[in-house]
Image: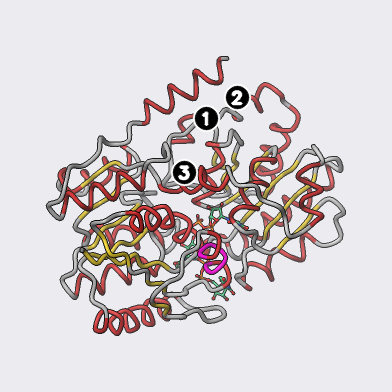
């Protein structure tokens, strides 16, 4: 059997790696040894628990207000020790966190092939998102197989000189994960949240955590959310707040004393997707949320000036609004007050996947190692046509 080691450390990596791990565990070809860095602690454990994943190695690196350098340094040293004791034949990393780039680097130093899931996303700006744009470019340089979620990400890699036979278009495994959880019967731990989701009231779901937004950008986001809540007393704002203390201390003062803003701890993935499904509008600077919300037919206003996920912007269901509070308020007002505008943005589209990304990923890794054939690439026209047919009914 081939020993394959998925390595990850944060909430979004865990969500997107879970379908791959589930598929690996069903495979007779691979011996899957899960390693986590624990770059996130509570938010990582929450996801592993949901998907029934028990890591074999846990570096437990998280520190309060950790620096990028400390995440990188602890991961490099910790993984070297893991590889000395339990060397894998192949390593798989996901996305653009510092965990993923550090893990790719240690594997590269040990001459272990690196498979990069969610490869080829590019914003074109090294400082936004920071440090993720640099992380993913660095990982691309040292990967042996690039699992690009879409044709656009494949093009980005080709433009940078990656050989076409090393790129497979898989779709994003986040859609596999989403399809897996939305079918589950989730009950909320928090009764108030259950009540709000069942109430039929208009809901605005907000998340923010991007490092480059911490500071003035996040103050503007806080101001905008408070203004929206004041202007629309019928609207309920649900704000699951990231555990980063630097985020919490900036944003929380703006959210106090509003009856229609409900701040929660990070929700389990099952709970979060239920709230997403019940939401009227989503306001976020998250990468994963930009991919999931269009699939559920929810308009997303992205509080960033650029995105490495242009597919849903092109489809018209995601708009970039930056962190100017007046513009955020204006765009939310438009969606709340103009029914035609709302219905144009609230179409279910699936440019990011069809739920088979993990299966394509495994077939591609097997093929790289000389076993079996790749599956046909993910072709967005299949799902986009499917979605528009559905909308026309
Ligand atoms: C990280 C990733 C980012 C990803 C995001 C997802 C990097 C550089 N950043 O950013 O790409 O979009 O995760 O959320 O890799 N904390 C806790 N408990 C937790 C998680 C975080 O207390 O479960 C606190 C800690 O004080 C920690 C801080 O949050 O130091 C920041 O976490 P960190 O992983 O450094 O940065 P994120 O902004 O979460
Ligand atoms: N998410 C979650 N609980 C929450 C907020 C988000 O499970 O309270 C999920 C969300 O569905 C998405 C992922 O976390 O799949 C996104 O994580 P985050 O925004 O932290 O990181 P990014 O995607 O921006 O890297």
- Density class for disc 2 (Cα within 10 Å; few <14, some 14-19, many ≥20) is few
In the displayed structure, does residue 227 sit left or right of residue 340?
A: right
Residue 318 spot, x, y in % from top left? 54, 37
Residue displayed at 33% across by 45% down: 359
Q: Quadrant of ligand 2?
A: bottom right
Measured along the vertical axis of the image, is residue 91 above or below residue 305?
A: below
**How far apart in space, not on screen, are marks 1 and 3 (Cα)?**
19 Å
Measured along the vertical axis of the image, is residue 113 above or below residue 205?
A: below
Seen from the viewer's position, the closer of residues 62 and 73 is 62
**How far apart in space, not on screen, are marks 2 and 1 (Cα)?**
7 Å
Q: Which residues are magenta?
A: 44-48
Residue 316 circle label:
1
Residue displayed at 55% across by 33% down: 317
Q: Sequence-wise, which precedes: disc 2 or disc 1?
A: 1
Seen from the viewer's position, the closer of residues 205 and 322 is 205
Specify the principal SS of the magenta part: helix
Whether ligand 2 has any atom under 8 Å from the Cβ at mark 3 is answered as: no
């Amino acid at each position: 059997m081939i020993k394959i080691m998925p390595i990850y450390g944060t909430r979004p990596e865990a969500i997107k790696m879970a379908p791959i791990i589930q598929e690996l565990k069903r495979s007779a070809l691979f011996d899957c040894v899960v390693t986590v860095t624990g770059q996130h602690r509570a938010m990582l454990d929450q996801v592993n628990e949901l998907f029934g994943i028990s890591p074999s190695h846990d570096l437990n690196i998280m520190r309060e207000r950790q620096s990028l350098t400390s995440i990188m340094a602890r991961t490099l040293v910790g993984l070297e020790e893991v590889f000395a004791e339990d060397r894998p034949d192949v390593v798989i990393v996901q996305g653009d966190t510092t965990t993923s780039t550090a893990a790719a680097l240690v594997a590269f130093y040990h001459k272990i092939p690196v498979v990069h899931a969610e490869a080829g996303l590019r914003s074109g700006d090294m400082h936004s998102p920071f440090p993720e744009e640099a992380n993913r470019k660095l990982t691309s340089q040292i990967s042996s197989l690039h699992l690009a979620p879409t044709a656009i990400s494949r093009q980005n890699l080709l433009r940078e000189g990656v050989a076409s036979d090393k790129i497979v278009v898989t779709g994003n495994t986040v859609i596999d994960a989403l399809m897996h959880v939305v079918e589950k019967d989730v009950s909320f731990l928090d009764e108030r949240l259950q009540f709000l989701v069942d109430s039929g009231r208009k809901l605005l779901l907000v998340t923010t955590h991007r490092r480059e937004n911490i500071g003035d950008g996040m103050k503007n986001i806080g101001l905008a959310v408070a203004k929206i809540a004041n202007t629309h007393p019928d609207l309920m704002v649900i704000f699951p707040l990231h555990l980063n203390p630097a985020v919490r201390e900036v944003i929380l003062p703006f959210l106090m004393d509003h009856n229609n803003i409900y701040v929660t701890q990070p929700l389990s993935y099952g709970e979060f997707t239920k709230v997403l499904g019940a939401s009227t509008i989503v306001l976020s600077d998250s990468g994963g949320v930009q991919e999931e919300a269009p699939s559920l037919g929810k308009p997303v206003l992205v509080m960033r000036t650029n995105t490495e996920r242009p597919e849903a912007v092109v489809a018209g269901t995601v708009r970039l609004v930056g962190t100017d509070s007046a513009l955020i308020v204006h765009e939310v007002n438009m969606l709340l007050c103009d029914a035609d505008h709302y219905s144009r943005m609230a179409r279910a589209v699936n440019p990011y996947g069809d739920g088979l990304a993990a299966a394509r990923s495994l077939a591609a890794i097997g093929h790289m190692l000389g076993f079996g054939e790749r599956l046909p690439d993910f072709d967005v026209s299949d799902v986009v046509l499917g979605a528009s047919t559905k909308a026309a009914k």
